[in-house]
Image: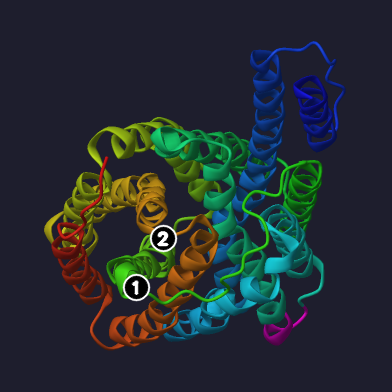
């Protein structure tokens, strides 16, 4: 009887992994097969991150200059443009709930494809400002679909003790793609007379390869979720931190490059150089942040982030008033590099959510709820920021960001989780 049960167990395992497991294989060997399958998916996920990094790097390098050169936007209009651009993020909770039956891997695959379609539209199908907004929203929808499930998939391919390290590896690997994108943009705009159309089409191809890589994965991460919307008092600090993070991130995302473009005349090839520096620095910082999350905890990481961001905000606000323009632009560019190099701190909020959720099925809904709440601030803040810039000047925008960073510091100190 025991022999029959063991035989049935081995056959079930073979069916589950879709590989042949000889009857005589030991438990250690079966564990090896499981680990092999997990690492196969992890490697495919890294490859997808590489291609997505290329697409995102291209968009980061050229999008603000594209808006300035092609559509001649003012500061006020640039701020208002964040409302449609961030609208998909606001509704991502509902979107992912509706698509939850697909599983996280398929959602990520469709998100990559949607981002690629958006870049194609920006490059070839935007004869007017209205059309550009449509394709911009498509790109935004795709990237926002990928955001919460990336952390969820990454943590499903690791154990609790290595969440930060694994997410750091995934995040760092995508930077290799970003570095390739920045080199491509720098060489293309400097020496090959590249235009925005070619750059966006290249980004489209990269995102399609990312979608294909994810489509080859066998696992589906956390499976179909019974809980589609999650609002618990237990998660309230996570939600508040998400809103504060959204407000602070959006000020930098919208107005930091706009300062460099409008005040100091920085061109796409210079943004490519800055992006390259950011990517190279971030390869190290993302792995470091991942290790700090595992060793020191989320409270330490988020507290450190808040302190650094407060200093960076002051650098943006007062450099041009204190120093000559040549020195001020270097300081502001340095703030831009440091700020963008710290984006991986978002991992700490994801691992914090993972450690406080009552059930693993609530993780992706909780992360997507956080992103939706984040985008309430992301849609409102740039509008007021644009108006504040137009009426008072850009330093006032970053003084407001410093206040937000200080509030983030206070809230981060309230985090309590077991290491």
User: Crowdedness of circle 2 by 10 Å Cα count: few (<14), some, many (20+)?
Assistant: few
In this view, the residue in front, 69 or 373, is 373
The residue lying at 67 percent from left, 50 percent from top is 55
Magenta segment main secondary structure: helix
Tag 1, which secondary structure? helix
Q: Can residue 272 be seen by looking at this rendering?
A: yes
Q: Quadrant of the C terminus?
A: top left
The residue lying at 35 percent from left, 53 percent from top is 352
Q: Quadrant of the N terminus?
A: top right
The x and y percentages for residue 162 are 43, 33
Q: Is residue 191 left or right of residue 13?
A: left
Look at mark 1 in the image and give the residue it sits on.
Answer: 243
Q: Is residue 110 above or below residue 210?
A: below
In this view, the residue in front, 128 or 23, is 23
| Magenta highlight on residue 294 | no
Residue 290: give its label.
Answer: none
The residue lying at 21 percent from left, 70 percent from top is 404
The magenta span reads: 127-131
The x and y percentages for residue 193 are 72, 48
Q: Can residue 282 be seen by looking at this rendering?
A: no
The x and y percentages for residue 195 are 72, 56
The x and y percentages for residue 313 are 22, 61
| Magenta highlight on residue 129 | yes
Q: Is residue 402 above or below residue 323?
A: below
Look at mark 2 in the image and give the residue it sits on.
Answer: 358
């Amino acid at each position: 009887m025991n022999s029959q049960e063991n035989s049935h167990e081995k056959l079930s395992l073979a069916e589950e992994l879709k590989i042949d497991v000889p009857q005589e294989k030991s438990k250690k060997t079966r564990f090896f097969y499981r680990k092999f399958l997990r690492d196969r998916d992890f490697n495919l996920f890294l490859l997808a991150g590489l291609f997505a990094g290329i697409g995102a790097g291209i968009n980061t390098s050229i999008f603000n200059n594209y808006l300035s050169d092609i559509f001649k936007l003012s500061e006020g209009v640039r701020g208002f443009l964040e409302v449609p651009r961030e609208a998909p993020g606001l509704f991502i909770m509902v979107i992912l709930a509706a698509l939850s039956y697909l599983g996280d891997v398929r959602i990520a695959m469709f998100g990559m494809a949607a981002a690629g379609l958006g870049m194609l539209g920006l490059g070839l199908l935007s004869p007017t400002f209205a059309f550009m907004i449509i394709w911009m929203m498509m790109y935004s929808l795709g990237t926002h679909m990928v955001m919460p499930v990336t952390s969820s998939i990454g943590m499903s391919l690791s154990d609790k003790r290595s969440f930060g390290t694994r997410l750091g590896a995934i995040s760092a690997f995508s930077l290799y793609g970003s570095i390739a994108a920045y080199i491509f943009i720098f060489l293309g705009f400097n020496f090959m007379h590249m235009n925005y159309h070619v750059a966006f089409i290249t980004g489209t191809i990269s995102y399609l390869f990312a979608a294909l890589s994810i489509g080859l994965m066998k696992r589906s991460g956390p499976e179909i979720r019974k809980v589609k919307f999650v609002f618990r008092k237990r998660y309230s600090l996570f939600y508040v931190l998400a809103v504060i993070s959204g407000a602070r991130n959006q000020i930098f995302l919208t107005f930091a490059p706009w300062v460099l473009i409008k005040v100091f005349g920085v061109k796409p090839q210079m943004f490519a150089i800055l992006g390259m520096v950011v990517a190279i620095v971030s390869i190290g910082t993302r792995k470091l942040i991942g290790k700090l999350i595992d060793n020191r905890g989320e409270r330490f990481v988020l507290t450190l982030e808040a302190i650094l961001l407060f200093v960076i905000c002051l650098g943006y606000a007062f450099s041009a008033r204190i120093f000559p323009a040549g020195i001020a632009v270097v300081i502001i560019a340095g703030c831009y590099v440091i700020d963008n190099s710290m984006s991986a701190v978002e991992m700490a909020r994801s691992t914090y959510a993972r450690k406080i959720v009552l059930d693993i099925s609530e993780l992706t809904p909780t992360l997507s709820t956080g992103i939706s709440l984040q985008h309430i601030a992301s849609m409102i803040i740039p509008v007021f920021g644009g108006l504040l810039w137009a009426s008072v000047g850009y330093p006032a925008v970053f003084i407001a960001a410093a206040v937000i960073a200080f509030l983030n510091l206070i809230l981060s100190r309230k985090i309590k989780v077991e290491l």
